[in-house]
Amino acid sequence: MQKTAAQNRERRQESLQTLRECFNKASIAIFTDYRGEAAGLTVKEMTDLRGKLRDQKAEFRVAKNTMIRRTLHDLGIQEADSYLQGPTAVAFGYEDPAATAKAVLDFSKEQKPNRLPQAKAAIMEGRVIDTQALEAIASLPSLEVLRMQLLGLMLAPHRQLLGMLNAPGRSMATVLDAWNTKRQEG
Protein backbone atom coordinates (compact mmCIF):
# COMPACT_ATOMS: atom_id res chain seq x y z
CA MET A 1 0.00 0.00 0.00
CA GLN A 2 1.50 3.31 -1.08
CA LYS A 3 1.31 6.44 0.97
CA THR A 4 -0.66 9.29 -0.47
CA ALA A 5 0.75 12.76 -0.94
CA ALA A 6 -1.45 13.96 1.92
CA GLN A 7 0.01 11.33 4.28
CA ASN A 8 3.55 12.29 3.27
CA ARG A 9 2.80 15.98 3.79
CA GLU A 10 1.28 15.25 7.22
CA ARG A 11 4.31 13.18 8.20
CA ARG A 12 6.66 15.98 7.10
CA GLN A 13 4.66 18.50 9.14
CA GLU A 14 4.93 16.26 12.21
CA SER A 15 8.69 15.95 11.69
CA LEU A 16 9.05 19.72 11.36
CA GLN A 17 7.01 20.27 14.51
CA THR A 18 9.13 17.76 16.44
CA LEU A 19 12.36 19.41 15.25
CA ARG A 20 11.00 22.87 16.12
CA GLU A 21 10.16 21.68 19.65
CA CYS A 22 13.63 20.15 20.04
CA PHE A 23 15.38 23.36 18.91
CA ASN A 24 13.16 25.53 21.14
CA LYS A 25 13.72 23.35 24.20
CA ALA A 26 17.46 22.76 23.71
CA SER A 27 20.16 24.83 25.39
CA ILE A 28 22.56 23.55 22.70
CA ALA A 29 22.11 21.75 19.37
CA ILE A 30 25.24 20.15 17.91
CA PHE A 31 25.29 19.28 14.19
CA THR A 32 27.30 16.14 13.49
CA ASP A 33 28.31 13.96 10.57
CA TYR A 34 27.51 10.42 11.65
CA ARG A 35 28.62 8.62 8.48
CA GLY A 36 32.07 9.98 7.67
CA GLU A 37 34.15 9.04 4.63
CA ALA A 38 33.94 5.26 4.86
CA ALA A 39 31.66 3.41 7.25
CA GLY A 40 29.40 5.38 9.57
CA LEU A 41 28.39 4.68 13.13
CA THR A 42 27.07 1.19 13.67
CA VAL A 43 23.71 0.61 15.33
CA LYS A 44 25.53 -0.41 18.53
CA GLU A 45 27.68 2.75 18.50
CA MET A 46 24.61 4.91 17.83
CA THR A 47 22.82 3.22 20.75
CA ASP A 48 25.84 3.75 23.03
CA LEU A 49 26.02 7.43 22.08
CA ARG A 50 22.30 7.89 22.70
CA GLY A 51 22.72 6.28 26.12
CA LYS A 52 25.58 8.63 27.05
CA LEU A 53 23.58 11.61 25.88
CA ARG A 54 20.50 10.45 27.76
CA ASP A 55 22.60 10.51 30.96
CA GLN A 56 23.25 14.20 30.22
CA LYS A 57 19.56 14.99 29.54
CA ALA A 58 20.22 15.13 25.81
CA GLU A 59 19.18 13.21 22.69
CA PHE A 60 20.61 12.37 19.27
CA ARG A 61 18.36 12.66 16.22
CA VAL A 62 19.07 11.97 12.57
CA ALA A 63 17.23 14.39 10.29
CA LYS A 64 17.23 15.55 6.70
CA ASN A 65 19.19 18.73 6.06
CA THR A 66 16.19 20.31 4.31
CA MET A 67 14.03 19.70 7.39
CA ILE A 68 16.69 21.13 9.72
CA ARG A 69 17.27 24.13 7.43
CA ARG A 70 13.54 24.82 7.17
CA THR A 71 13.09 24.60 10.94
CA LEU A 72 16.02 26.93 11.58
CA HIS A 73 14.73 29.44 9.02
CA ASP A 74 11.35 29.38 10.79
CA LEU A 75 13.22 30.16 14.02
CA GLY A 76 15.13 33.01 12.33
CA ILE A 77 18.53 31.29 12.09
CA GLN A 78 20.05 31.34 8.59
CA GLU A 79 23.76 31.17 9.46
CA ALA A 80 23.75 27.37 9.84
CA ASP A 81 23.06 26.62 6.16
CA SER A 82 26.72 26.12 5.25
CA TYR A 83 27.07 23.38 7.90
CA LEU A 84 24.10 21.38 6.62
CA GLN A 85 25.97 19.36 4.01
CA GLY A 86 26.06 15.57 3.87
CA PRO A 87 24.40 13.29 6.42
CA THR A 88 23.48 15.17 9.57
CA ALA A 89 22.42 14.16 13.05
CA VAL A 90 21.74 16.66 15.80
CA ALA A 91 22.59 16.23 19.47
CA PHE A 92 20.06 18.28 21.44
CA GLY A 93 21.18 19.15 24.98
CA TYR A 94 18.36 20.23 27.25
CA GLU A 95 20.17 21.12 30.47
CA ASP A 96 23.95 21.50 30.59
CA PRO A 97 25.46 22.58 27.24
CA ALA A 98 29.01 21.81 28.39
CA ALA A 99 28.11 18.27 29.44
CA THR A 100 26.35 17.60 26.13
CA ALA A 101 29.28 18.95 24.09
CA LYS A 102 31.74 16.95 26.19
CA ALA A 103 29.70 13.75 25.75
CA VAL A 104 29.60 14.11 21.94
CA LEU A 105 33.27 15.08 21.56
CA ASP A 106 34.52 12.44 24.01
CA PHE A 107 32.47 9.74 22.28
CA SER A 108 33.94 10.83 18.95
CA LYS A 109 37.49 10.58 20.32
CA GLU A 110 36.79 7.05 21.60
CA GLN A 111 35.73 5.87 18.11
CA LYS A 112 38.91 4.79 16.37
CA PRO A 113 39.81 5.04 13.54
CA ASN A 114 36.81 6.92 12.12
CA ARG A 115 36.25 9.44 14.96
CA LEU A 116 32.49 9.67 14.51
CA PRO A 117 30.24 11.50 15.02
CA GLN A 118 32.23 14.43 13.76
CA ALA A 119 30.98 17.79 15.03
CA LYS A 120 30.27 20.34 12.30
CA ALA A 121 28.93 23.27 14.33
CA ALA A 122 26.39 24.02 17.03
CA ILE A 123 23.63 26.42 17.89
CA MET A 124 23.59 27.92 21.34
CA GLU A 125 21.36 30.77 22.47
CA GLY A 126 20.28 31.39 18.88
CA ARG A 127 23.84 31.77 17.57
CA VAL A 128 25.86 29.42 15.41
CA ILE A 129 29.20 28.44 16.92
CA ASP A 130 32.07 26.63 15.21
CA THR A 131 33.89 23.52 16.39
CA GLN A 132 36.63 25.49 18.19
CA ALA A 133 34.06 27.26 20.34
CA LEU A 134 32.30 23.94 20.88
CA GLU A 135 35.56 22.39 22.15
CA ALA A 136 36.02 25.36 24.47
CA ILE A 137 32.51 24.83 25.85
CA ALA A 138 33.19 21.11 26.30
CA SER A 139 36.30 21.90 28.34
CA LEU A 140 34.27 23.90 30.88
CA PRO A 141 33.39 22.22 34.16
CA SER A 142 29.87 20.84 34.40
CA LEU A 143 27.08 23.02 35.75
CA GLU A 144 27.05 21.03 39.01
CA VAL A 145 30.80 21.57 39.54
CA LEU A 146 30.43 25.29 38.81
CA ARG A 147 27.61 25.56 41.35
CA MET A 148 29.75 23.85 44.02
CA GLN A 149 32.70 26.14 43.28
CA LEU A 150 30.46 29.20 43.51
CA LEU A 151 29.00 28.00 46.81
CA GLY A 152 32.52 27.46 48.14
CA LEU A 153 33.49 31.00 47.16
CA MET A 154 30.38 32.39 48.80
CA LEU A 155 31.02 30.50 52.06
CA ALA A 156 34.75 31.28 52.30
CA PRO A 157 34.36 34.83 53.77
CA HIS A 158 31.89 33.54 56.36
CA ARG A 159 34.31 30.84 57.47
CA GLN A 160 37.11 33.38 57.77
CA LEU A 161 34.90 35.74 59.78
CA LEU A 162 33.83 32.92 62.08
CA GLY A 163 37.48 31.96 62.60
CA MET A 164 38.37 35.56 63.48
CA LEU A 165 35.44 35.83 65.90
CA ASN A 166 36.39 32.57 67.61
CA ALA A 167 40.10 33.46 67.86
CA PRO A 168 39.88 35.76 70.95
CA GLY A 169 37.77 33.17 72.77
CA ARG A 170 40.31 30.45 71.95
CA SER A 171 43.16 32.70 73.09
CA MET A 172 41.39 33.49 76.35
CA ALA A 173 40.68 29.80 76.96
CA THR A 174 44.34 28.96 76.34
CA VAL A 175 45.48 31.66 78.81
CA LEU A 176 42.99 30.51 81.46
CA ASP A 177 44.02 26.87 80.98
CA ALA A 178 47.71 27.79 81.37
CA TRP A 179 46.98 29.88 84.50
CA ASN A 180 44.91 27.03 86.00
CA THR A 181 47.69 24.51 85.29
CA LYS A 182 50.29 26.81 86.87
CA ARG A 183 48.08 27.39 89.93
CA GLN A 184 47.61 23.65 90.43
CA GLU A 185 51.36 23.02 90.20
CA GLY A 186 52.36 25.82 92.51
Image: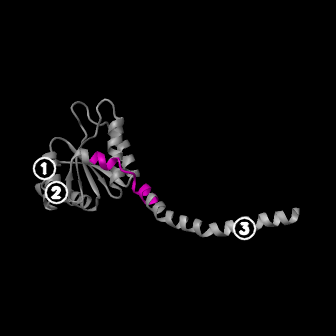
Where is residue 183 shown, x and y percent of the image? 85, 66
Q: Earlier in the sequence, mark 2 or mark 1?
A: 2
Sequence-wise, the earlier of marks 3 and 2 is 2
The amino acid type of the residue labelled 3 equals: Ala
Which element is circle 1 on?
Answer: helix
Residue marked by disc 3: 173
Q: Which of 139 and 28 is in front in this view?
A: 139
Q: How far apart are marks 2 and 1 (CA)?
A: 9 Å
- As helix, strand or loop, the secondary structure at mark 2 comes to helix
Q: Which image quarter holds the C terminus?
A: bottom right
Categorize mark 2 by other alpha carbons within 10 Å: few (<14), some (14-19), many (20+): many
* Residue at 21% over, 32% down: 37
> Quick check: 68 above or below 111?
below
Which residue lies under the disc numbered 1? 81
Asked if residue 152 is positioned above or below residue 88 in the image, the reply reads below
Name the main secondary structure of what is drawn in magenta.
helix
Would you say residue 136 sits in the magenta stretch?
yes
Colour pattern = one colour
First in sequence, mark 1 or 3: give its number.
1
Marks 1 & 3, CB-CB < 8 Å contact: no
1 or 3: mark nearer the eye: 3
Residue segment shown in magenta = 134-148
Q: Residue beneath label 2, please?
A: 72
